[in-house]
Structures are given as C-alpha cells and as structure tokens.
Amino acid sequence: MTATLRVPGYHGPRVLTGYTLHGYEAVILENERVRAVVNAGRGTHIPELVYKPRDLDVIFKHPRPHKHHAGFVPTAYDERPYNDHHAGGWFECFPNGGGPGDLEGARIGFHGEVWGQPFRIDAIEESPERCAVTLTGFTQRTPFRLTKTFSLRAGDPCLRIDEKATNLGEQDLKVLWGQHPTFGGPFVDAHCRVEGPATSYFLDGEDPPLRRKWPAQNEQGRDLGQVHGKDARMSRLVYLTDFAEGKVRLVSPTWKLAFEVEFDAARFPYVWFFENAGVLGAPWYGRAQMVALEPFTGMAGSLKEGHGLLKIPAGQTVEASFAGRFVEL
C-alpha cells in the first residue's frame, strides 16, 4: 500500500497518516502525554497505546509474528478466524462478543465482525486544544455502519472513542456490543490488581448464573481482583456489574500507574474481566500474560440466549462513548 505521509499542523495534539502496519493502513494520534496507534485497515484495532512520560506501552501483543489477512491460508475451516488473526491490542466486539451466535439468520462468529473489517479515514481535526480522526466501516454479514472518532486533548492522558452504530436494514436488530482493551507486559505483572465501583459479579460458565458480592475473595482468601503471575498457567472470566460509576481500572504498583477504562454503565452494565496467566495449549502455548477489562451490554452468549442485547431500530443510529485514561499513583 502506498500512502502520502501527512505533516501535522501542530506540535501538540496531532494526527499522523500515511503509515502502514503489517500491510494495513494506520493512523497515529499524539499529544504531550499519549501516543495511540489505530489500525484503520483492521477494525480500528489499537496495537499500541503509550504513556509517554514513562515510555510505557500498556497493550498486550500476541507473541507470534503478525501477518495480513491476505497472507494467510487456513488449514482447518472449523476454527475461529479470530484466533488465526488475533494480534492482541484494543479492539471492538460488534455485533457479537464471546461465542458464536445467530442474528436474524446471519451466523456471527467469536467476537463479531468488526475486528477484521477495514475502515476508511473520513476526517482529521487538529488544533492547539485537540486532535481527532474519524473513521467509518461496514459489517459484512449484517447491515451496520460504524463511525468512530478517536480524540486527544492537549495535555490530557486520555484517549476518547465516540461511536455511532447505524442499522442500515429495514428491520430492528439487537446486538451484543463491547470494547476489548487487552493489557500486557511489562505493564501487567503479578502485582497488578483490578479495581472499580462494581458491587456484584458473575462467574463465567455457571448455569444458572449466581450474582455474588464484589469485591470478593476466593476459597483460599485471595482477592479476586489480584492478577496472577504467568507461572499460574490459568485463565478466568469474571463479569463485574452493578457499577455505581462507569469506570474500572488496572492498577500497577510496579509502575505506580493505573489505566482506567471509562464507559456508560447504564448501556454497558457489564465489564468482562478476563485473565490469561500463561495458559498452555493453543493458541498461546504458555506464552501469554494478559488482562482484559471489557465494557459490554451483556455477558458472553447473550446473542445466542437473547438477553443483554442493545436494540438498534431499522434506519436508526445509536451512539456510545468510551475512554482510556492513564492515572499516576
């Protein structure tokens, strides 16, 4: 892909375009404190989010070499495409999250469609106070248009994502919608913990699901918000809910820094707290240590089970906003 490098208009908040990442078009937003790389060609996936005062990238990277979709030929056709192409990072789950489901006859796979779709760059904004880039993409199996604006304000260590999801079809549709920011080393280690104003949680896989009080400890007296070391060889998924305020944070005593995810708790009442601490077997083979804090409309399996879904009427648009903020401790 050939692109012309764009010279930003300001030294403060600025947008850089004309770059490629593994063959995909990429755009970079920067201010004095944050650098965010957005992979426009691959679902607006964020593969790099750096806190510049510490020169620290908090995003998890898949340990295998990354390659473009076009450079991959599957050898088995009954596997999740997401696992073949997962690169880590912060990506979006729409119109599904978790396991596969059916949306009015369209079979939607693991973590939806958006993560693998190209977006076009529609608008760039730069001023001494703010920089922003607006991108638009379309789902393939379902009739949705997503418009996303990423922005940074001068001196503010916070990346904002403002979205519009439009149903281009002629019938009302219900979606499972979520953000999937995934954090890794060196930011993530066994000293990290998850904090937030949730008062309840559910464990994944329980039938029926039982609402429990948060914060909590396990049978061994370990705080459930405490992150494990990579040698634990375990994974877990906990659904935090009943938030007094739409925010949750991953706290690193090692770096004396926290990363806070902000969201609309009324529309996205669940945060999926997922942890992989050196899990053996495919697709990680013991090479991963990650924590994901994922605001969602419902729990995994919602599209299949019909609850925790957001209705988008025919021809209508629903808006949502999220943010990721660095907090010095």
Image: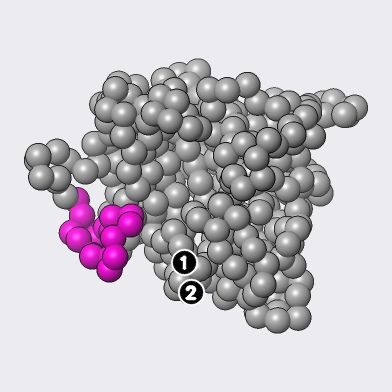
Q: Hey, what amino acid is under mark 1?
A: Ser
Residue appearing at x 64%, y 63% in the figure: 107
Q: Is 7 above or below relative to 135?
A: above
Residue appearing at x 79%, y 34% in the figure: 70
How crowded pointer 2 is (Cα within 10 Å; few <14, some 14-19, many 20+) is rated as some
Q: Is residue 17 left or right of residue 177?
A: right
Q: Quarter of the image holding residue 241? A: bottom left
How crowded pointer 1 is (Cα within 10 Å; few <14, some 14-19, many 20+) is rated as many
Q: Is 183 above or below relative to 146?
A: above
Q: Are marks 1 and 2 in contact (CB under 8 Å)?
A: yes
Residues at marks 1 and 2, CA–CA distance in whole angstroms: 5 Å
Q: Over which residues does the magenta segment extend?
A: 198-215
Give how far across and how far down residue 99 sits, in percent: 50, 56
Magenta region includes residue 200: yes
Q: Is residue 214 left or right of residue 312?
A: left
Q: Nearer the viewer, residue 190 or 153?
A: 190
Q: Is 235 above or below relative to 109?
A: above
Residue appearing at x 56%, y 52% in the figure: 110
**Observer able to see residue 267:** no
Q: Is residue 29 left or right of residue 187?
A: right
Residue linked to disc 1: 302
Give how far across and how far down residue 7 sits, in percent: 82, 26
Q: Hey, what amino acid is under mark 2?
A: Gly
Q: Which circle marks residue 306 in the picture? A: 2
Magenta region includes residue 324: no
User: How many marks can you see?
Assistant: 2
Q: How is the image coloured?
A: one colour
Q: Nearer the viewer, residue 85 or 252?
A: 85
Check the picture and name the quadrant holding the N terminus: top right
Q: Nearer the viewer, residue 202 or 160?
A: 202
Q: Quarter of the image holding residue 316? A: bottom right
Check the picture and name the quadrant holding the C terminus: top left
